Amino acid sequence: MSCRAIGLSGGVIFGVVFMYFNWLTVAAAAIALLSGCDRPSAEQQIQQPVTEVGVVVIRPQHVAFTTELPGRTSAFLVSEVRPQIGGIIQKREFVEGSDVEAGQVLYQIDPATYQAALDSARASLAKARADVTSLRAKAQRYKELLATDAVAKQDYDDAQASSKSAEADVAFYQAQVKTAEINLDYTRIAAPISGRIGKSNLTQGALVTAGQASALAMIQDLDQVYVDVTQSSADYLRLKRDLAEGRVSGSGAAEAKVNLVLEDGSAYPLAGTLQFSDVTVDETTGSITLRALFPNPDHDLLPGMYVRAVIEEGTNDKAILAPQQGVTRNARGEATALVVGADNKVEERQLKADRTIGDKWLIASGLAAGDRIVVEGVQKVRAGMVVKPVEQPQQSAEESAKARAPQL
């Protein structure tokens, strides 16, 4: 009999009985009869379906830890071309913006006065040498005559002293000739290093002086380029701690590789090496300066360019990575994840996430190998529910990082 029929019958019975019995007793019986109709039978109960969620099985992975830092390029060698003597520039011997070789003449200063000074020094040297010949012969004759007492001892001593003085004059004028030759050679201003020369700051007819403040031009060696970047001291300490505790295997500074991302987002094709890190922390920024050296055969990198350096810090062969879509934050800002246990029951885990590797979080604690973390349907489940886990495919750390890296 249906609940509706029972309800009608119950109403009739209630009316008849009410005429003979106390109305409170009848009301209680009617309520009991009607409440029995509200309980569904076993056949009427509807089985609720088990919620299906996508999970990823945590597996230890090999991870190369990298840090991306902003920096600027600078030339490997820089030389400012300056005059070492004074004079008038007669001509310029190079093309601005061209490559020059060490020793190549760049400017010619008027050599007339320096040539005259050299000629004068050479003449003085010739005279001094002639004096030496005469005085040396005189001293020798006095020595022979002194043996027979033909000359006084004082005369012999004077002849010897004059001969020595003439020899000193020869040495002096030899130095004068050398100085004049150097000054004359300085009238031809040569490139001190090989590289690319910039614009000329002075033109033909300009007066230059030794030790002047402004350079004539600048030469920069661009076959190799430095990249200077800064790293926070906090990151430096974290890396040092991970290395000490064995979580990261580091390489020596000479082996640390550095890659570049250029201003337009493209990747520089050649890798560089980390040269050194500064030993002093900048008090204003709390950072340490790092310098890397890059080959630059095609001169694609120019001094002053803004770049991003990707530095390899070390590796971890047993890193625990969790997909970012499976990690959320609670009200206190702590990282949490829903993990499906062996009985397919969901539990909430509190995690310690260190950093991102591609599209994954590096987990320091809270997850272990073999754990199944919910990545799809996170909003539909909560801790304590029984679910149907469906394993999802996942990329390795290298594939994920490669997919997010700039393409050549």
Image: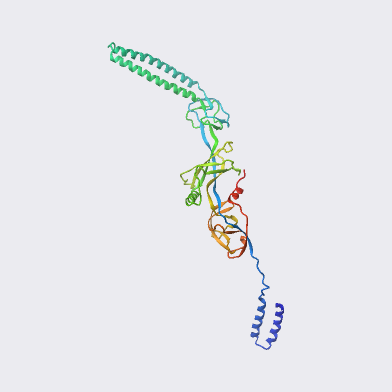
| Image label count | 0
Q: Residue at x 52, y 35 (%)?
A: 77
Residue 202 drawn at (x, y percent):
54, 29
Left or right of 6? Residue 119 is left
Image coloring type:
rainbow
Residue 346 drawn at (x, y percent):
58, 63
Q: Residue at x 53, y 51 (%)?
A: 316
Q: Quadrant of the N terminus?
A: bottom right
Q: Quadrant of the C terminus?
A: top right
Q: Residue at x 46, y 20 (%)?
A: 118
* Farthest residue, direction left: 149
| Residue 175: quarter of image | top left
Residue 404 drawn at (x, y percent):
61, 48
| Residue 57: quarter of image | bottom right
192 above or below 335?
A: above
* Farthest residue, direction bottom: 20
Q: Residue at x 48, y 22 (%)?
A: 114
Left or right of 368? Residue 148 is left
90 above or below 329?
A: above
Considering depth in this image, is 204 or 34 the residue closer to the camera? 34
| Residue 372: quarter of image | bottom right
237 above or below 165?
A: below
Considering depth in this image, is 185 or 223 the residue closer to the camera? 223
Considering depth in this image, is 402 or 261 the residue closer to the camera? 402
Residue 75 drawn at (x, y percent):
53, 37
